[in-house]
Amino acid sequence: MKKSFLLIFLISSFAAFAQADFEKKLQTKLILAEDGTTIEIEAGTFFLTKSLSLEGKKNITLRGKGIDKTVLSFKNQTQGAEGIKITNCENIILEDMTTQDSKGDLIKTMQVKGMTFRRLKAEWSGKPKASNGSYGFYPVLCENVMIDSCIAIGASDAGIYVGQSKLIVVKNCTAFQNVAGIEIENSLFAEVFNNTAIGNTGGILVFDLPGLIQKKGGYVKVHHNIVKENNLSNFAPKGNIVGNVPKGTGMMILAASHVEIYENQILNHATMGVAVISYYMTGLKNKDKEYDPYPTDIQIHNNTFERKAGRVPMEGRFGQMYRIKLKFGTQVPHVIFDGILDEKKVGKDGNYLPEFAICVRENKGQSSAIIDAEHDFKNIISGPDALNCNPESIKSIQF
Amino acid sequence: MKRFHVIFLVWLAAGMLMSITDFSTKEFNYPEKLSEYGFFEGSMKEQIPAADVVPYALNSPLFSDYAYKLRFLRIPKGQKTAYNPDSVLQFPVGTAIVKTFYYKNDERNDKKGRQLMETRVLLHEAKGWVALPYIWNKEQTEATLEVAGGSQLVAWRDQEGNKKSMEYFVPNMNQCKGCHEKSGKMTPIGPSVRQLNGDFEYQHNLNENQVSHLKNLGLLENLPEKSTEIPKIPAFNDPNASLDLRARGYLDINCAHCHNPAGPAKSSGLFLSWGNTNKSAYGFFKAPIAAGRGSGNLAYDIVPGKSHESILAYRMNSADPGIMMPELGRKLIHKEGVALINAWIQSMETK
């Protein structure tokens, strides 16, 4: 009897020691790794107390044994604003593991040229809550970003967030129970396809915000995604831009330009299928004079829209707008445009010149509305073809 | 027989766990021991600088969990650095900047001794600066290079005699760069002229202005003719300095090493550098970008006249790793710093 207790004691105390030892050895390995190294992590759950960091390296692969087989848990984290932080690197591959429950973001990569996230899960376990960290996958100021076959769960901001980056592919990913499933922000040349965004507050967001280093994003293609039932109550801490996204948002384009949305399934959103809005709709001040607050050249075509009849939920700023101002009742248009135009881009007919048009056509189940937000919603135009355009102005965005 | 089973099982379990964690540590070409540099004379723990090493202090230092700091500079013989009013001095290759962190056992009584925690060595090599953390042993006879950093319990009594203790955290080499970075390159943060422009007690009861001292040693050249032209940041707690200068100096040293247009926090668009005159980029009515929980349900970084509505003050007043700023280098809240920034924001006209 005594011996088995001794054995358990020995093994458990060794395990605790081994965890601390694992963390230190892995971090040391990341610091000393020579360019071109592959670092493998065995299967198992490892509890880390600090951020893991990789800095200033080239051609490094950090590889586990698979999602949910190699698990890095940051549940006991006492230091660092993210789980894994990769900075100032080139050609980094992170693959085949799960990261969990960090205090801030899970995987942040900054100033990396050639960043691949592959077969990774980033999750906050338990119910969605405001105390979860902000971003699951968080490349910022990166170039050539590939996010492939990743899963993001429970982020109090965005599960997959690409900020101020260039040349981005997000494909075959799944995002659920985040405030935003996938968000492309102030980023250029992004393709988002074959992803599934279900049960978030908002499914896929394309935003351009003021006051940033990379001023202007755009040239974003979003296609062949399943965006479904993103009706989760918004649990983002207020003050964050995604705090403005109403529950029941399929996609939202905020002040971004040259965006093409096609062949997506956009299904059962209580508030809006796709919203195309200017920065003015956030109600926030803007002091960045170089910032362009208007979305222009937006193409929404060949998607499938479905929505069950029902009133828009009364939640937040947008909920109030729908219920008090727009009053669509139970049949709510799939696509809305705030109708606030950049005067410099308007033709003689008072509409955008063709190259700047907001264009919605040839969608299954199509309905849309221009809500005239600039004039207190006085002249709302709605109907299946409210945002129809000359078919010639539908041109695939090239980059 | 049974005992052998037990031993075998433990051995087996140990072997399995070891195989998971078996990373070989490569050789690393920096001194393993702090003493190898020859920065100090006599007993290491006394931290008495060698003849070619100059001690210095900053007017308004970075807050590091109430740790005290001893700073030293070693510029190679015959070399010097040129005066500049704006940024950290551009020291020649071969320069070493040395900073030892310690706690007084009793802040009310220096005679009770102190505990040296770590010494960070910044070396200027031909390829750039490199940062090396050395952790002191319990006997206080030597500090050893630990590239992965570490942590150590420390206990002390504060100025009111309250017992304090915490797990002191030594950053790893990568994290050093998390603060010491400009345009992707490692850089020192502290020793700018505006931080050095103040008196230092070089010998008992013998004070001298640090800028003059460096000039007199032949280490600093091209100074302006009038010493009044040399900029100066006041100590954050200097009762004779203006609130605005104290607050902006505090933000400069505590935040601007990341929050500048070439620093690690450039993605935020919030720039708290001493010379920044763009009020929006300085945080005035600036909405957060990717603050997450750090926003604290607030809309702007600085709302003039309303510190409780300002994210800047909120994040300084937190010790949660997902909220607090700076995000590295502290576990405790700098109450005096928070009070300063609150007072500064409150003093502004409400708009």
Image (spheres, coloured by chain):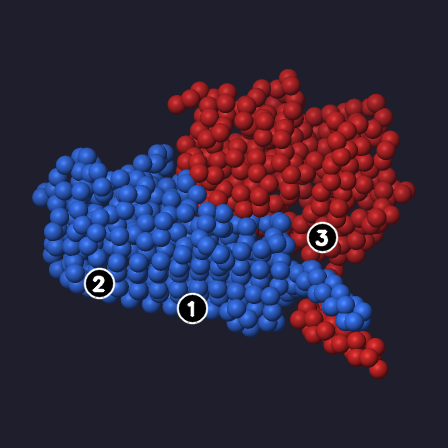
Q: Chain of mark 2?
A: A
Q: Determine the secondary structure under disc 2.
A: loop
What is chain A's hue in the picture?
Answer: blue
Helix, strand or loop under label 3: strand
Q: Which residue is mark 3?
A: B150
Amino acid found under the numbered disc labelled 3: Gly
Q: Which mark is residue A342?
A: none
Q: Quadrant of the C terminus of chain B?
A: top left
Q: How far apart are labels 3 and 2 at the CA level?
A: 54 Å
Q: Is residue B225 visible?
A: no
Q: Nearer the viewer, residue B233 or B69?
A: B69
Q: Give, as a three-letter code, the residue at label 2.
A: Asn
Which quadrant is the N terminus of chain B positioned in? bottom right
Query: Which chain is red in the picture?
Result: B
Return the residue at label 2.
A303
Q: CA distance from mark 1 to mark 2?
A: 23 Å
Q: Chain of mark 1?
A: A
Report x, y in % for residue B276.
Answer: 49, 32
Bin the neighbour count of mark 3 within 10 Å (Cα to Cα): few under 14, some 14-19, many 20 and up.
Answer: some
Left or right: A153 in relation to B204:
left
